Image: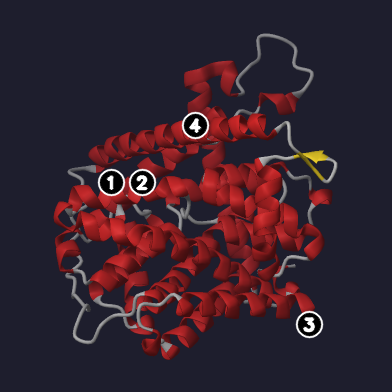
């Protein structure tokens, strides 16, 4: 049954679309058909995953696959790092929970999934999945072939590899299509990180793997819609056809595994470096704020983010009593990366946050829209398109807003649906 929280989420949906229209470069060209189609497509994808009879079997298979990958990765990690990664301990352990370390228990998954993704791409399995989603987006959302392929690739490969998939068409993309690709890249996550997020949340969220997978897929049409609202396609521009002969190729299965592993290692190093730097900077700011007291408690970055983003979290359908904590997570995602936000969400005990709020935050956090990704986007596209670097620089901050709002829109769609669907 619908309740006030569902209506609250619908209000958030309207607010997000209205905000994007307000800052649009051409408010007269609002894509009404695309807006209706995108919302219906998002709702249909969520319902198809959670509401269709037998869907729980699929969700159980996804969760079991994640657990299998986690177990297999742990075996490889223990072989290299021994007791540091959970192997046989050389001394008595009183607190088993203290053995969990992010570097050894989560980050290796990124390397393994990156290698596996490269192998599946070489075997054309992942490529055909991408082509299938690209066809759906092309037919249902009116995208050109290259743009549709970019949207689909972002779901599985992420914002770094996607430009390589359509490299032959990058210079032919219109300004609107370039912006759309950037927004979708920032509004979704890569397959190599999905499993890591699901692993972090599985102890505190049922069907964590299913929610994370659906979050990235469903945010794609949201990102397309918001990008089209903010920078509408001009008549006669765009629609570049693609023959789907990707520039992303491997010489053999072994080559795919080796290169995928190397790419995954680079991602792990980047994640580690960014986490160390940003967490240290926040701690430094907290030290500087430590002498200030507001409301009888020391001022901190966490408190500031909680207050600033509480209304934003409330618009997704979160109860006001939990809006401050949820808003803090959104602020962490934007400033410290979604990895840190998922870690913090995973630390919150089940009794300290409702299942609804935890689920909505999973969708709202599941995207690369953070300040660190701005640099990654600019660097990657500048290498591939040096002649359009200034154009990319002019679009990237607006794309960050679009990507952030896209995951918020997805959370609103989920929040507007009856809770019984996810029970």
Q: Are marks 3 and 1 in contact (CB under 8 Å)?
A: no
The residue that disc 2 covers is 375
Label 3, residues with CA under 10 Å away: few <14, some 14-19, many ≥20: few
Mark 3 to mark 1: distance in Å? 47 Å
Residue drawn 64% across the image and 31% down it: 288
Q: Which residue is mark 4?
A: 277
* Of callouts 3 and 1, the N-terminal one: 3
Relative vertical location of residue 98 with respect to residue 305 in this rendering, above or below: above
Query: Which picture quadrant has residue 290?
Result: top right
Q: Secondary structure at mark 4?
A: helix
**Residue 24 location (% of width, % of height):** 40, 77
- The numbered dot on residue 1 is 3
Which residue matches tag 1? 379
Q: Residues within 10 Å of mark 4 (few under 14, many from 20)?
A: few
Residue 131: x and y, percent? 30, 68
User: Residue at position x 29%, y 35% from top?
Assistant: 258
Q: Secondary structure at mark 2?
A: helix
Q: Earlier in the sequence, mark 4 or mark 2?
A: 4
For residue 3, side relative to residue 408 (left or right): right
Residue density around tag 2, few if under 14, some if 14–19, many if 20 or more, within 10 Å = few
Distance from the alpha carbon under mark 4 to that under mark 2: 14 Å
> What's the distance in space between the residues labelled 3 and 2, CA to CA?
44 Å
Work out which quarter of the rendered image holds the N terminus and state it.
bottom right
Secondary structure beneath label 3: loop
The answer to whether residue 211 is visible is: no
List x then y, in percent, for residue 210: 59, 59
């Amino acid at each position: 049954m619908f309740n006030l929280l569902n209506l609250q989420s619908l209000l958030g949906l309207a607010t997000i679309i209205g905000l994007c229209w307000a800052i649009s470069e051409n408010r007269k060209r609002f894509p009404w058909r695309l807006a209706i189609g995108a919302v219906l497509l998002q709702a249909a994808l969520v319902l198809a995953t959670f509401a269709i009879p037998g869907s729980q079997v699929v969700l159980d298979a996804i969760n079991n696959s994640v657990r299998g990958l986690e177990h297999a990765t742990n075996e490889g990690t223990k072989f290299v790092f021994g007791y540091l990664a959970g192997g046989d301990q050389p001394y008595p352990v009183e607190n088993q929970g203290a053995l969990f370390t992010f570097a050894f228990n989560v980050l290796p998954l990124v390397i393994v999934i990156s290698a596996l993704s490269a192998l599946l791409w070489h075997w054309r399995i992942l490529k055909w999945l991408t082509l299938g989603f690209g066809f759906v987006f092309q037919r249902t959302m009116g995208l050109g072939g290259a743009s549709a392929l970019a949207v689909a690739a972002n779901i599985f490969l992420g914002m770094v590899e996607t430009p390589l998939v359509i490299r032959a068409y990058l210079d032919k993309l219109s300004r609107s299509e370039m912006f759309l690709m950037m927004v979708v890249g920032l509004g979704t996550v890569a397959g190599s990180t999905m499993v890591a997020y699901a692993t972090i949340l599985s102890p505190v969220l049922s069907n964590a793997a299913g929610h994370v997978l659906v979050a990235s897929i469903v945010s794609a049409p949201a990102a397309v819609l918001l990008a089209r609202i903010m920078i509408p396609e001009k008549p006669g521009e765009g629609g570049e056809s693609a023959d789907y002969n990707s520039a992303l190729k491997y010489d053999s299965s072994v080559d795919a595994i080796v290169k995928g592993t190397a790419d995954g290692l680079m991602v792990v190093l980047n994640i580690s470096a960014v986490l160390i730097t940003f967490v240290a900077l926040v701690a430094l700011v907290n030290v500087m704020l430590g002498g200030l007291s507001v409301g009888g408690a020391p001022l901190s970055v966490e408190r500031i983010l909680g207050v600033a983003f509480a209304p934003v979290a409330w618009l997704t359908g979160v109860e006001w009593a939990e809006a401050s904590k949820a808003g803090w997570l959104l602020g962490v995602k934007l400033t410290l990366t979604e990895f840190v936000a998922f870690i913090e969400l995973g630390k919150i005990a089940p009794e300290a946050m409702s299942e609804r709020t935890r689920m909505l935050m999973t969708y709202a956090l599941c995207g690369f829209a953070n300040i660190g990704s701005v640099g990654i986007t600019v660097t990657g596209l500048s290498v591939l398109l040096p002649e359009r670097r200034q154009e990319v620089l002019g679009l990237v901050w607006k794309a960050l807003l679009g990507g952030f709002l896209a995951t918020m829109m997805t959370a609103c769609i989920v929040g507007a649906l009856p809770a019984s669907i996810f029970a």
